[in-house]
Amino acid sequence: EIPEIPALEPFVYSPAKTLAQIPFPEADGGTWSWVNPEERPCVANAGYAAVYTPEENSAYAGYNAVIPLDVNPAQPEILNATGSVLTYGQRLKESHIEGKAFCDGIELEGGGFYWTEESRPPSAGNDGYEVLYVPEDQNNYETVRGTADITVQKKNITVRVSDAERIYGDENP
């Protein structure tokens, strides 16, 4: 007799988790285990190989199956996002964003940070501006919003004055 294929709870992708950390529910007359427990489950998958091992005197036989697993994309966490220094009057798009994105304590490779209002000139004394982190791996991670700090320096101005004289009441030269 063939055992019932287990239905597993949805799982959020993590670069730190493997199939070994996804438990099977109790099975009648035996246990299920992953064929490749060190494999990292991804959002785009066709299921993962598992084996059913019957208990002694079980009505079920040993069985291999592909177990469906619903894996949802993870939301990275943005840390230490900072825009390069601007001078008053420049726009956010002129500032390069440096930052890091993490998932379960692991820094993500690739991807990029983008200002959501890149044509906006930031003000001095601001509390940061909204950015998007677009991961390189868009199958397993969602694009997320965060805030990047940015310093706006004072703009130096040059005033030129020419030496001119006039008599009170006359028009300016």
Image: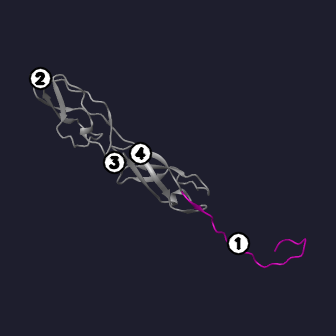
Given this view, does label 4 or label 2 mark the residue nearer the observer? 2
Q: Residues within 10 Å of mark 3 (few under 14, many from 20)?
A: some
Q: Residues within 10 Å of mark 4 (few under 14, many from 20)?
A: some
Question: Which numbered tag is attached to residue 159?
Answer: 1
Side of 73 where 156 appears, left or right: right
Q: What amino acid does circle 1 point to?
A: Val
Residue found at x 20% / y 26%: 5
Q: Which residue is mark 4?
A: 143
Residue 49 x, y percent position in the rendering: 18, 36
Q: Give yes or no for contact between labels 1 and 4 (Cβ–Cβ under 8 Å).
A: no
Side of 88 where 55 appears, left or right: left
- For the C terminus, which image quadrant? bottom right
Residue 58 x, y percent position in the rendering: 11, 22
How far, Cα to Cα, is label 1 from label 2?
A: 91 Å
Q: Main secondary structure of the magenta part?
A: loop
Question: Which numbered tag is attached to residue 60?
Answer: 2
Numbered disc 2: secondary structure: loop
Residue 38 x, y percent position in the rendering: 22, 43
Q: Give yes or no for contact between labels 1 and 3 (Cβ–Cβ under 8 Å).
A: no
The range drawn in magenta is: 150-173
Name the residue nearer the viewer: 162 or 115: 115
Residue 102, compared with residue 3, is above or below; it is: below
Is residue 154 inside the magenta stretch? yes
Q: Earlier in the sequence, mark 4 or mark 2?
A: 2
Which residue is situated farthest in the front direction here? 56
Q: Earlier in the sequence, mark 1 or mark 3?
A: 3
Q: What amino acid does circle 4 point to?
A: Thr
Side of 51 where 20 appears, left or right: right
Figure coloring: one colour
Q: Which residue is mark 3?
A: 137
Numbered disc 4: secondary structure: loop
Given this view, does label 2 or label 3 mark the residue nearer the observer? 2
